[in-house]
Amino acid sequence: MLRPAYFIALSLLLSPVTGFAGGTPDLHSPAFTAVPELTAGFDLLYEQKFAEAREALASWESRNPEDPFGEVAVAASYLFEELYLQGVLTSDFFLNEKKFLHGIDGRPDPERMGHFREALAQAGQLARERQKANPKDGEALFALTLAAGMESDAESILQKRHMSALKRMKEANEYAKRLLALHPEAADAYIAPGIANYIIGSQSAGSRFALWFGGIHGDKKLGMEQVAKTAENGCYLRPFAKIMLALAARREKQDALAQKLLGELNEQYPDNALFAFEYAKAMSLAAPTAPVPLTVRH
């Protein structure tokens, strides 16, 4: 029976930046340009200020109703909040083999997940409309990659629908490949195949063999190299790639890499209790008080 460690292929939060095939990229698009308001919104997410982040991202979306990335960003805010509240983005989760292979205990918040799925549905509809005019539309590929990756995370780690999660993971990986074939400089997109490669590569030999017959392959080393590209040169997902790579590094006993990445995150977001806690643990320091989940605000 396949084990669902592949659930984290995240994600969320997980595989953006693209462009338009055959021509100059639209430099005003979030796929190629760090839009200040979006950057500020994602920074608020990494500061664990979820309500404020959602307000900033929704504000940009309301003024750019034809761009699917706005809805994707709003969906990411709900998913990232749920992952935080469930303790997923921690070494306690990654280093606990049972949790890593089987996902969270309990169930996610139904109202938050409802908002998450509504935003994903809107993003998918907008992206498909753009593809009718141009199947290689960069913004559409950008949004579809992210949406499929986030849905895979939610299906597996939060709701334990593992076969459905596998399908969404494969879909996200295919969108990312198409996007990177057109625009290899789109560093955020590397996180999608990177996480997929790492998680699938972490499976038992028997599980990897079974997945191979389904056309799903994984390589832990390659996966970490791909996530590193986003951690080094990504835009909105650079901090997310850093925490994912740091946690993977802790699993692989690559302590120096984990310490470096967590130190950078702690310096960039000094008010993020989670980053401070994980950095202290990686450095074998007296850890501050374990981060307490924020009061949920919708």
Image (cartoon, rainbow, N blue to C red):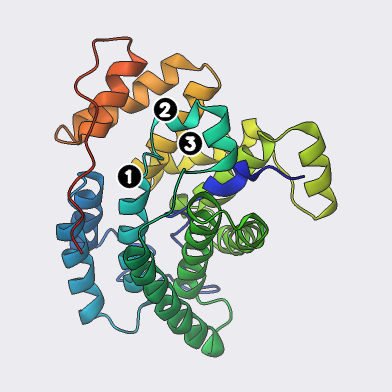
Is disc 1 surrounded by few (<14), some (14 to 19) or many (20+) residues within 10 Å?
some
> Which quarter of the image is occupied by the N terminus?
top right
Query: Looking at the picture, does residue 71 appear above or below residue 250?
Result: below
* Spatial CA span between label 3 and label 2: 18 Å
Front-most of 39 and 203?
Answer: 203
Residue sitting nearer the eye, 291 or 80? 291
Circles 1 and 2, Cβ within 8 Å, touching? The answer is: no
Residue at the spot of label 3: 228
The residue depicted at 38 percent of the width and 71 percent of the height is 114
Q: Position of residue 145 (x, y in %)?
A: 52, 64
Residue 207: percent from left, percent from top: 77, 40
Reply above or below: 199 against 74: above
Secondary-structure class at tag 1: helix
Label located before the other in sequence (3 or 2)? 2
Tag 3 near tag 2, CB within 8 Å: no
**Alpha-carbon distance for marks 3 and 1?**
22 Å
Q: Which amino acid does label 2 sit on?
A: Ser
Residue 23, position as x, y percentages in the image:
49, 74
Q: Camera-side residue: 229 or 72? A: 72
Q: Where is residue 295 in the image (x, y as percent from the top left)?
A: 17, 50
Kindly report which numbered mark, 3 or 2, lies closer to the viewer in this rendering: 2
Q: Are marks 3 and 1 in contact (CB under 8 Å)?
A: no
Q: Can residue 211 be seen in this view?
A: yes
Q: Could you tell whether 142 is left or right of 280 in the image?
A: right
- Residue at horizontal 58 percent and vertical 41 percent from the top: 102
- Reading the image, the residue beneath label 1 is 84
Q: Distance between the residues labelled 1 and 2?
A: 12 Å
Sequence-wise, the earlier of marks 3 and 1 is 1
Which residue is pictured at 85% across the width and 51% down the height? 213
Lower position in the chain sequence, tag 1 or tag 2: 1
Q: In this view, does 35 lie to the left or right of 221?
A: left
Q: Mark 2 points at which residue?
A: 91
